[in-house]
Image: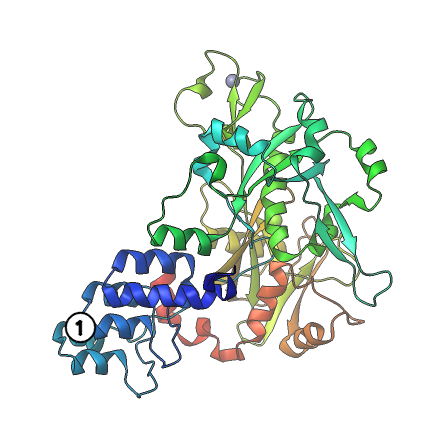
Amino acid sequence: MMTDFEKNPRQDVISQLHHFAAVGDAARVKALLSYSPSLVNAATDNGWTALMYGARNGHLEVVQVLLEEGCDRSIVNKSRQTALDIAKFWGYKHIANLLANVKGGQRPNFKECENYFGLTLLDRRSDKRTDSKWLSQKQSHPTTVYILFSNLSPLVTSSGGIESSQQPEVKLCRLSYKDVEQWMKQTEEVTLVFLGVELQFHMNLLSACNGKVLQEVEEDGLVAWFALSVNSAEKYKQEHEDHYFLHPPMPALLQLPEKEAGVVAQARSVLAWHSHYRFCPTCGSATKIVEGGYKKTCLKEDCPSLQGVHNTSYPRVDPVVIMQVIHPDGNHCLLGRQKRFPPGMFTCLAGFVEPGETIEDAVRREVEEEAGIKIGQVQYVSCQPWPMPSSLMIGCLAVAVSTEIKVDKNEIEDACWFTREQVMEVLIKGNQRSFFVPPSQAIAHQLIKKVLHREGNKHPLFKKTNLIILIFK
Ligand code: ZN
Ligand code: MG
């Protein structure tokens, strides 16, 4: 029989949130919102929010938590009351005071930008990496999902496309232990990485909230995911003609569904680390893989890397700054191209952060090196894991304080100022005869779009210079 929860999970979680707010359980309100921050202002049919329930019942701590989580105090219910009205009506003066006097009005409820490769299906559960009993039980568990890699390319299948007019849908092949058993025995030639468990927070959270004890290992209900890298999959491919490895990674990986792309980003970067760093960076000895694939330990007994914590033992992430440079007039942006790009493609300038350098200085240095443009203020926007093999693209807006372009031909082929109208047209109409920009999956595309969405000199970097200095200095 279907429970109400299964029929309408969102509604049920909202009811739980309101219940916790009404009974004054601030800890659970906080826990629930940490999983589902978007529910902070969710209302029932009568327009009541969690804040109103907290205020109605005099729970100061609940009200504080909700304010910290950025809830909107100005929402009114069907009776046209705000949470403040409700607190006053029921005589909770301390709550009314709090609601009336929160500094600076509503906390800006800024949304984290969600870029491609940044969304995932999994909770990494790093706590399980050292639980070898759990890991080995999950490895052969029937619900466990394996994704297969060969030469750092994931095994996929595609549907539609041929007969339908739509683009074929490319999806990861979710294999079971039975499918991969043949490789698991050849431990010399395969690399196994524990990726996490399927996100099913609503279900788990609700059972935790209801006080049900989660069962022991075998029946914890968690669906584990592993990445398995194999040397040869020829025989397998002969048996499964519709399965193939996505190659070359760029731009092929951009065809994956967003949440699978995040899983591939995680898996590919860790597997690339294993394949590129085969020996101990400290002494050159052989290493063994431990902690579910997230650590390498040197096999030489007295290696200094065995004492204390060393970053050489863990997967690497390489920070890259990528910036949308805005002309001092606010109406042009700087885009460049490298020789290896397809003809006509222009994008944001980018470069690796150097040791001992801040993000802001890396932006200023790269833009000056590559295009000869001097940069003033720099503002972080959002980031994107880029698994080629393990970069983290740190997206910024940067305001130019000079305009004369001097291209360093060793670094890039060309750089130009483009007008807002030119860029707008390219984004709306796609591939133009004159030039085009990377697809929407690339953070560069999102940064370029961001500039357009703001009216020229109304851009906050121009309007509120003092404020920006305050925040970013
Ligand atoms: Zn060593
Ligand atoms: Mg450079």
Give left or right: position of 229 versus 65. Answer: right
**Mark 1 within 8 Å of ligand 2, using the beta carbon:** no
Q: Residue at x 58, y 45 (%)?
A: 391
The percent coordinates of residue 42 (x first, y second) are 40, 72
Relative to 190, does residue 453 appear above or below in the rendering?
below
Relative to 216, does residue 325 appear above or below in the rendering?
below
Q: List the single residue furthest toward the top.
A: 301
Give left or right: position of 397 versus 18. Answer: right
Observer able to see residue 111: no
The percent coordinates of residue 100 (x first, y second) are 20, 78
Q: Secondary structure at mark 1?
A: helix
Q: Please name the amino acid that badge 1 sits on.
A: Ile
Would you call the spot at circle 1 few (<14 residues within 10 Å), some (14-19), or many (20 or more)? many
The percent coordinates of residue 101 (x first, y second) are 20, 75
Q: Residue at x 33, y 50 (%)?
A: 211
Observer able to see residue 158: yes
Relative to 159, does residue 79 appear above or below in the rendering?
below
Number of numbered callouts drawn: 1
**Display colour scheme:** rainbow
Q: Quadrant of residue 377?
A: bottom left
Q: For mark 1, what is the residue? A: 95
Q: Residue at x 28, y 85 (%)?
A: 81
Q: Residue at x 48, y 63 (%)?
A: 9
Q: Nearer the viewer, residue 256 or 27?
A: 27
Q: List the single residue furthest toward the bottom.
A: 80
